[in-house]
Amino acid sequence: MDGNLAKELSFRESVNLMFDRAVALMELPPGLEDKIRVCNSTYTVRFGVKLRGEIKTFTGYRSVHSEHKEPVKGGIRYALGVNQDEVEALAALMTFKCSLVEAPFGGSKGGLCIDPRAYDEDELERITRRFAYELVKRDLIDPAQNVPAPDMGTGEREMAWIADQYARMNTTDINAPACVTGKPPHAGGIRGRVEATGRGVQYALQEFFRHPDAIAMSGLNGTLDGKKVVVQGLGNVGYHAAKFLSGEDGCKITAIIERDGALVDEAGLDVEAVFQWIKANGGVKGYDATYVANGASALEHDCDILIPAALEGVINLSNADRIKAPLIIEAANGPITAGADALLQQRGKVIIPDLYANAGGVTVSYFEWVKNLSHIRFGRMQRRQEESRHQLIVNELERLSQDSGIGWTLSPDFKESYLRGAGELELVRSGLDDTMRSAYQAMHNVWRSRDDVTDLRTAAYIVAIERVAEAYKAKGL
Ligand code: NAD
């Protein structure tokens, strides 16, 4: 391991180092590398909210990493550990993520230092509206300039409050709902956004398993069917990824790691039942499976695929040499530190990097933003027309079969699925699948065609940085 990795780097330093590894293999015009690396600005706000008879002061951030495309895009996180270093690292990742999946945005991120579980719904609404007010009045929430989305600790509910707060402050803005994505469908959201990041993790793995050379690099074989999977974090991303992989691809979820410990079952855990258990009991403890109090130790379990889907830095210099999974997919942002990344690579592990693996969220956020700006639901104009054209073919086939005396009949299942026009959810999934496939292929081509690129992360950064550089060059910077 090189000397500067002997100590653990901060999240921001880790992202910078990963960026540096990629640009060392690129030929960028002098100075452009620095321009792309730096975070353009970070706004820190401290505000008070009167709660339970006293004024509580909160600290929040909104960081803009790159404005080579606008609006800039990135989630808002609610967690006690939120700090400037973390928000800037996440904003930088957003720049590269958007570029990799060709979502036309720059990178941004926000965060509020708060434990959302310590407040009731009314209190959270007041805190969220006040935070949104501070950001809106500085154009740090705006459909044309800066569009937040959910992240750890936030979801549809918070996004609906933010959208409403913006609308109250911009009463004549017809595009107001486009100021934030991840809203509930009845408040201007899009179907398929809640599941999008986990769905994207599933599509990413499906695409990986379409490439025999990639599978061989990981030392695995076959398909996703029957693969043993360990998931850390059964929140929005982890729950959906685990649910789809076990329910649709035949994976076995052999361990689920949460805040209070891990559940292990070699035969495969029932994801929905565990999820409902956590909702009712606040943790995994007590569920009918083997319970391990030191949850993080389950990251080291023998499995085929490891999915860290909770928080950053969980695979680090202290445990990287004990990780057994041959394939790790970073559903969370930054779950592997730069030091651990180097160690895991030396040990031949294949890592599907965060900037690709969890890009499903921003991809569907992009669809939602377009829907809000066009003021019409995807599929609304075409669906019935598509169905009647399909009906024409079915009628004609049945007529031909009867007239010719062949007597073919179309199976009811075929007819049912062929005749059904695509609604919003089907279109969103199709667009997401297409995006995850093309982004993987771009990354894969660099990984497998260049001798100096030995991992998917460096390949992903090269593809992403190249596109950001092209945008800057085209603008004349
Ligand atoms: P979430 O708040 O819905 O879920 C996080 C889950 O992790 C919770 O179930 C929580 O209990 C669990 N957790 C927290 N600390 C833990 C610990 N120490 N050990 C084990 N489990 C722990 O958050 P989320 O939206 O699912 O985000 C998870 C990760 O995915 C974050 O890194 C986030 O930045 C990233 N991400 C989220 C989205 C999105 O659309 N929500 C998009 C891209 C990336």
Image (cartoon, rainbow, N blue to C red):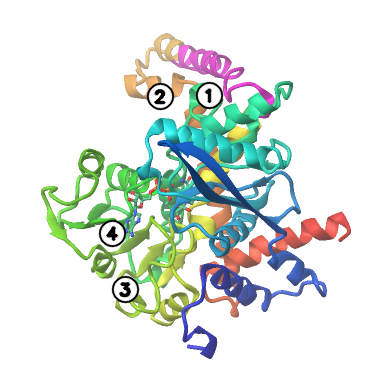
**Mark toward the start of the polypeptide (1 vs 2):** 1
Cα gap from disc 1 to disc 2, whole angstroms: 30 Å
Horizontal arrangement in the rendering, residue 129 relative to residue 273 (left or right): right
Seen in the picture, residue 200 relative to 18 is either above or below; the reply is above
Q: Mark 1 points at which residue?
A: 187
Q: Which amino acid does label 1 sit on?
A: Ala
Amino acid type, residue under disc 4 in the picture: Val
- The magenta region covers 372-397
| Residue where numbered disc 3 is placed | 323
Badge 2 vs badge 3, beta-carbon distance below 8 Å: no
From the viewer's side, name the closer residue of 395 and 17.
17
Residue 161, how many percent across, how many down? 53, 30
* Residue found at x 41% / y 77%: 344
* Foreground tag (2 vs 4): 4
Q: Which of marks 1 and 3 is in front?
A: 1
Look at discs 4 and 1 and give the one toward the viewer.
Answer: 1
Q: How crowded is mark 1: few (under 14 residues within 10 Å), some or many (20 or more)?
A: some
Mark 2: which amino acid? Answer: Ser
